[in-house]
Amino acid sequence: MASVGIHHGPETYSTLEVRDVETSRLQYLEDSNKEAVPHPESQYPQPVFIPNAWDSPGTKASGTDKEAAVAQEYNDGNAKRRICGLSPGVFKIVLVVAIIVIIGAIAGGVAGGLSSRNRGSDANSTPTPGPNPEPERSENVNVLSSSKLAASNFTDPQGNIHRHVFFQDPYNSIITRQWDSENKTWTTMNISRLLTTSTTGPIHPLPGTSLTSVSADDRWGSLYEMHVAFLEASTDSGHTFSWLHASNQLGNPNFWTYSPSSLRTWNNSQLAAAWQRCPKDDCVGSYIVAYQGPEGSIKTANASNWRNNTEPVIRANSVSSVASLALVPSLFGSYVHGLTLASQKRPNSMGKTTFIGDWNWKEDDGTILGDVEPSETRQFAATTMNNWTEALFVALSTDGGLRGARWDGETYNAVPDINFVDGESTNFSAIAMTTDATFYGISDDQIWEYTVDTADPSTFRFASKVYP
């Protein structure tokens, strides 16, 4: 396989690292930390017209002595009853009109009060700039509730461990948290923001897109790359996957480039990636992405030619739709040149497919874990252990639970129960693992880190809160 060759010319990027969640569009970024000052709303009086019934004109009979007529009425015993100086008929009319006016005034006051309160609520809320998407309607403020997770790591020549954890914020921006073991700090970078002014950007990841990441290093100690792949909507129907590439993580960690792909995927396809080491000492290896094609088969794309529509690795009728995937490097002879691909096989298992060199994949290569129902599974993740001689594959169920299988170099052994020691929240909605037996999970709007006990992979020990 050819080595990575996707690079772009030098560009100027912001090196600003943000502590809080940033938005993916420039308008958001300018306004996201500004306070919206509400404008007071005036409660205007409601004009109400009330007729003065007591001023109603009377009827005047021409040529009649009024006093004589009244005296005559009393004298005859036929005097008419009057209410508040009005005849009963007129009084009833006035009363009905007054009741209608009062009811109308009350209704108008209530409606005006509700309208004023709603206007006041709108004024106090943070506005969303027009052309940008609104944040997801959820209680989450840190992580998109449908966000997936990706993670990768490398060790520099000084022995310092570098980790990247990728996720989406409520505005669909791709965020990375970076760990530097020398400084023992997590820092935040909004990659979507960095690429808004790039000649290769901006990016438009789908909300809740599958994410996969891999780091690349070689034995010369001169190559430290970081890659992350995600799904975007195509210009016509369907989705394609795209990727972000940082080619100098030690010298310029804020320099990222964006490369779209024309390779079509199954809508909401899951993704998995691995760095395949070169079997020789004079090459660096290849970056591999596994994805589900639009016809349902599982395919791989290689850094030597991302636009090459490769032959299926696993047939469509063998896997479920939106198949869970995990891909890890494995020993092939004395070099880490092999690959092991876990996929959601039908009817209900985590199947094994291995790469044995020279573009040859062995599709039906056994079962990693049985009784894995597709409708009850969210995703897979995997890691290597004990200097690439062992591996651990895990499946996240829809109820947030986790179980797995350990490869001990000869066979797969089920790990039905995983114990999170000293753990915080463990009801995970998304998971990821690095190649050095580190586990990450999203739960309760936060991201948590655990280390796998390689002697007993059923034990995950709490390490830290990654975000926020």
Image: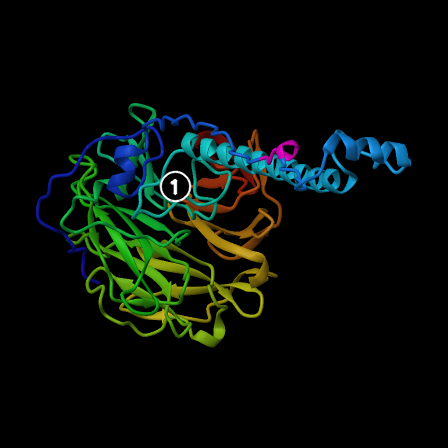
Residue 69 lies left or right of residue 355; in this view the side is: right
Q: Where is residue 38 in the image (x, y as percent from the top left)?
A: 39, 27
Q: Residue furthest right?
A: 77
Segment tinted magenta in the rendering: 50-55
Q: Where is residue 393 in the image (x, y as percent from the top left)?
A: 49, 52
Identity of the residue drawn at 19% across and 62% down: 304
Q: Indicate the quadrant where residue 183 lies.
A: top left
Identity of the residue drawn at 43% across and 39% down: 143
Q: In this view, does 351 lie above or below 184?
A: below
Q: Position of residue 67 (x, y in %)?
A: 75, 30
Identity of the residue drawn at 31% across and 45% down: 130
Q: Indicate whether residue 144 is drawn in magenta.
A: no
Amino acid type of the residue tagged 1 in the rendering: Asp
Front residue of this view, candidates 401 and 468: 468
Q: Which residue lies furthest to the left in this view?
A: 9
Residue 93 lies left or right of residue 82; in this view the side is: left
Image quadrant containing the C terminus: top left
Describe the element under mark 1 as helix, strand or loop: loop
**How many discs appear?**
1
Front residue of this view, candidates 233 and 449: 233
Name the residue carrying label 1: 169
Front residue of this view, candidates 387 and 339: 339
